[in-house]
Amino acid sequence: MRISGSFAHIYIALIHYPVYDRQERVIATALTTIDIHDLARLARTYGVGGFYLVTPLKSQQELAKRVVNHWVRGWGAEYNPTRKEALSLVRVADDLEGAVKGIEAEGRQAVKTIATAARRYAQARSFMEISDILRRDRRESYLILFGTGWGLTRETVSRSDYILEPIEGRDYNHLSVRTAAAIILDRLLGGK
């Protein structure tokens, strides 16, 4: 399925590698099926072009493909057509480069990446700035990166074209990736 909505030039990616663990070691995290469901539904709700799961682990890729196939081609497709519509947006890539190439293969222009992080970075742009860029420049494609574990590596963040400011909570900063992604997409694409 390819979305033709107003934000079809925007994609999201859930990065499972490279990310940090609690001690800031670079690791690969395991997929959770609820992330697949919820982020696919989020992508469909906001009309983005697609949702990439990024992991080099073949067992995790197979798990993702089994979940997606159940809801897109299997019994789940008849049982819940709206879930089929959302899960049709899911793609699997070995790495970030593979996700970018996948977007380009869909006929999109050069892809710019937007890193999200709970950490503060001096180069971070505000939600308003990034929202304006996404709404104004529809010729370019954008891939918003969400990290699992303890977040995207500094190298991934520094290689991104843009870094988004963190979500400000109240004396606590440990949202699930599903919750953070929903808040971020709503702030960037909602309402206006």
Image (cartoon, rainbow, N blue to C red):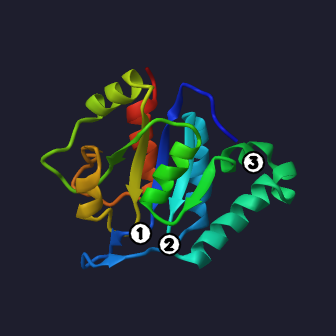
Amino acid at circle 3: Lys
Residue visible at 26% across and 54% down?
159
Helix, strand or loop at mark 2: loop
Helix, strand or loop at mark 3: helix
Q: Which residue is mark 1?
A: 17
Along the line of sight, the residue nearer the viewer: 100 or 37: 100
Q: Position of residue 66 (x, y in %)?
A: 72, 67
Separation (CA) of disc 3 from disc 1 = 27 Å
Quick check: 137 above or below 183?
above
Asked if the residue under mark 3 is in contact with the one under mark 2, i.e. CB atoms within 8 Å, the reply is: no
Asked if the residue under mark 1 is in contact with the one under mark 2, i.e. CB atoms within 8 Å, the reply is: yes
Indicate the quadrant where residue 28 lies.
bottom left
Amino acid at circle 1: Tyr
The crowd level at tag 1 (other Cα within 10 Å; few <14, some 14-19, many 20+) is many
Separation (CA) of disc 2 from disc 1 = 7 Å
Q: Position of residue 97 (x, y in %)?
A: 43, 57
